[in-house]
Amino acid sequence: MKISTRVEYGLAALIDIAIYSSTQNLVNVASIAKRQNIPSKYLEQVLTPLRQARLIIGIKVAKGGYVLGKTASLITMTDILNVLDSSIIGEYYESGLNCAYTMKKIINDNLWKHLEKNINQIASSVTLEMLVDKYKETISEENIMFYI
């Protein structure tokens, strides 16, 4: 499965915003770009549709930045993917096959529709909060020191 850099960077940015804005701080593009190693100009382009969809809110003050538009537990992967790349979980499959209609229908009904259903179920069950929790768990495990 190929996932675009737009989706990868968007998810990384949302997780970053969820973590660093949890203390009521605004998270600016420069800090996200530095922590996540994302080019700032590209990050701005990725954040624009997330802001337009109100998944994040941009605050314009002296040291402005972003906060989540709603609680991380209410933001699903379906929400994020629909904003960043709806083709991943799109509801319409148009076969490029140049074969008979019956063959296209069999492939569509017995493969693509099942894949789409499962992807949609997973995307709607995974929340931003779950990814944030996994990130925090991984970071805390990496910071454990063993003394001999």
Image: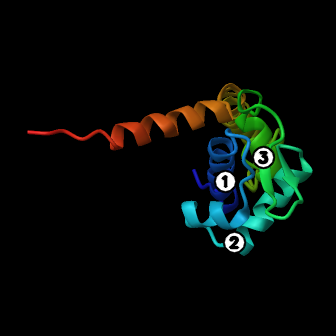
The residue most toward the left is 148
Q: Identify the mark at residue 40; answer none if there is no mark.
A: 2
Residue 71 place in picture, x, y as percent = 77, 31
Residue 130 in the image: x percent, y percent?
A: 60, 30
Which label's residue is closer to the chain start, 1 or 3? 1
**Res 137 quadrant in image:** top left
Left or right for 107, reference 69: left
Q: Which residue is mark 3?
A: 67
Q: CA distance from mark 1 to mark 2?
A: 11 Å
9 is higher (above) or lower (below) than 42: above
Is label 2 or label 3 in front? 3
Figure quadrant of residue 46 = bottom right
Q: Secondary structure at mark 3?
A: strand
Would you name the residue on which mark 1 appears? 13
Residue 23 position within the rendered picture, expressed as x and y whole percent measured from the top left: 67, 40
**Dot 2: element:** helix
Can residue 115 be seen here? The reply is no
Q: Are marks 1 and 2 in contact (CB under 8 Å)?
A: no
Residue visible at 59% across and 55% down? 2
At label 3, the amino acid type is Val
- Please tell me how many numbered marks the rendered image carries: 3
The answer to whether mark 1 and mark 3 are in CB contact below 8 A is no
Earlier-in-chain disc, 1 versus 2: 1
Q: How many residues crowd mark 2 within 10 Å: few (<14), some (14–19), many (20+)? A: some
Q: Which label's residue is closer to the chain start, 2 or 3?
A: 2
The scheme the figure's colours follow is rainbow
